[in-house]
Amino acid sequence: MTERIKTNASNLLDEDKTTPQISNYFGPGNALDGKLLINGEAYFEGSECSGKITAVTEDGALFFGAGTKIQCDVRAHQVVLGGTMEGKIEAERVRITEDGDFSGNIITRRGLTIDDGARLNAKISMKKKRDK
C-alpha cells in the first residue's frame, strides 16, 4: 500500500519534484473534525475533514487525493488538491489538479498551479516572503 500512496502523491506533484516521503496517511472511511498538526507530509484519500490542518515542519506537504472532501483551513509548505475543498489554503506552493475543486481563499508566496479541468472559485493573494 505504501508504494501505491507514494505513486499517487508523486502524480500530484509538479513534474520537477521527487517522490514524497509520506509519513501520514488518512484513507477512505476516516473523518477528521477539529485541529490536526502534521509532522512531515500527509496524504488524504477518500477522507472527510473539517476544522484546521497544519503541516508544522518547514517543508511539510499536504496531498488531498480524489474523493477527499475538505471543509478546512490548511497551512503547509505545499498543498496539492485533487479532491473537493472549501476553506482557506496558505502555502508556499499550491496546486489544484484536474480532479480538484476549490472554493475559498488562497494565500501563496511562490506559486499557484491550476491544471486543465480543475474547478476554482477563490480569492487569491500572492505575497512576498517577508509579507505576513
Image (cartoon, grey):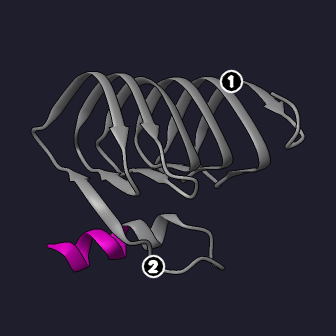
Q: Residues within 10 Å of mark 1 (few under 14, many from 20)?
A: some
Q: Amino acid at mark 2?
A: Thr
Q: What residue is at 50 percent from the left and 35 percent from the top?
A: 101
The prevailing secondary structure element of the residues shown in magenta is: helix
Q: In the rendered view of the protein, which quadrant contains the N terminus? A: bottom left
Residue identified by numbered label 1: 122
Q: Which residues, given as a range, are shown in magenta?
A: 1-8
Residue 127 x/y as whole percent: 86, 36
Residue 89 x/y as whole percent: 59, 32
- CA distance for labels 2 and 1: 29 Å
Side (left or right) of 113 relative to 55: right
Q: Amino acid at mark 1?
A: Ala
Are dots 2 and 1 in contact, CB under 8 Å?
Answer: no
Side (left or right) of 100 relative to 71: right
Whether residue 6 is in magenta: the answer is yes
Residue identified by numbered label 2: 19
Whether residue 33 is in magenta: the answer is no
Residue 107 x/y as whole percent: 72, 31
Closer to the camera in the image, 122 or 111: 111
Q: What residue is at 29 percent from the left and 43 percent from the top?
A: 67
